[in-house]
Amino acid sequence: EDEPQNRYPSVTVDRRFPIISYERLEKQSILGRGGFADVMKARHPDWRQEVAVKCLQAGKIEDGREQEVLYSEARKLKLASKSDHVITLLGVCLEPLFAIVMPYMENGSLARLLRDVDVPWALRWRMAHEISLGMTFLHCQDPQILHCDLKAENVLLDGDFHVKISDFGLSKWKAGSRVLTKTSPEGCTVTHVPPEYFDIDLELVPNEKFDVYSFGVLLWEIATRTEPYKNVVNTALIRLAVTTGQRPNMALVPTDLPEVDTVSQLMQRCWSQDPEDRPSFQECEDDLRAVNNKTS
Ligand code: ADE
């Protein structure tokens, strides 16, 4: 009878999560808004560390499905957090709503950093290498964790600019994955989705090559500090372009970039049309470690 109260019966309480009192969190500001969840910056009176709290938006909290998506995110994060390069799950709130509590990352997202600051090359390649380390960890779990939403927006940076991969809202366990298909894999960012998932006739279960493709686009974002397909007017045209083999514009990759050949080849291998031609994250990690050794 000391079971924590939970007024959403669709969510099974997992006792292995530290339970944090939502009421005691002093909410400060909104850090981000997603499809169904908001992330708030907050303080807990007992901790020095500031936190980020991900909770469902007001209109969505009556819906059990969204609740379950957030709970499923917490379960994957709990396991993934063992990597130094994945955001740590500090605990969950249950009342009056389910929320995920994680450390606040002082330097925000990689997307924001690339937009606002001319980040030195050595740091950019260190961050790329750390992302590949975090992703290698996810793909080495049994069952494998697929992130399925890897992009600069979902890479956070701590006070020392070390990488923490975040936002497991679309992530999947590889075994037992539901089919992710057809014209628009639900909620995914079109610029980072591989072409095989746009094929209406194929019902593909996501695999690790999905994340590798997204990583190729992410490397290009790091190299160019711009958004892919900026001049393509809508998502349908982006899908069409990608399906017919078009990719982010390599002419935008600066020629003075250190190790330009290695990095350019790596991003292009990652976004190969045939998933079989894409490397594993372990191979990406090897290449980027070599790039780092030469540039730092
Ligand atoms: N945005 C989303 N999650 C965050 C976090 N943990 N720290 C800072 N900004 C965030």
Image (cartoon, rainbow, N blue to C red):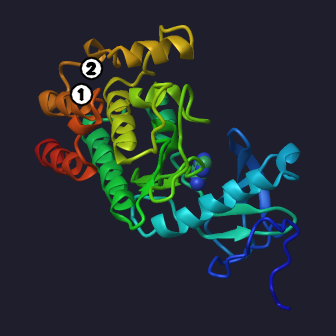
The amino acid type, in three-letter code, at marker 2 is Val
Q: Is residue 179 visible?
A: yes
Residue 200, relative to residue 263: is it above or below?
above
Using residue 8 as the reference point, say whether residue 239 is left or right of it.
left
Using residue 292 as the reference point, say whether residue 102 is left or right of it.
right
The numbered dot on residue 268 is: 1
Label 1 and label 2: CA atoms lie apart by 12 Å
Q: At numbered mark 1, what does the secondary structure look like: helix, strand or loop?
A: helix
Q: Which residue is at the front of the view, 117 or 41?
A: 41
**Which residue is at 42% across, 20% downward?**
228
The amino acid type, in three-letter code, at marker 1 is Gln
Residue 170: x and y in percent read 57, 46
Q: Which residue is at the front of the view, 227 or 141?
A: 141
Q: Residues within 10 Å of mark 2 (few under 14, many from 20)?
A: some
Residue 14, relative to residue 257: is it above or below?
below
Q: Is residue 117 visible?
A: no
**Which residue is at 33% across, 62% downward?**
140
Q: Residues within 10 Å of mark 1 (few under 14, many from 20)?
A: some
Task: Give the labeled residue for mark 2.
Answer: 253
Q: Which residue is at the front of the view, 183 or 152?
A: 183
Using residue 195 as the reference point, say whether residue 53 is left or right of it.
right
Quadrant position of the N terminus in the picture: bottom right
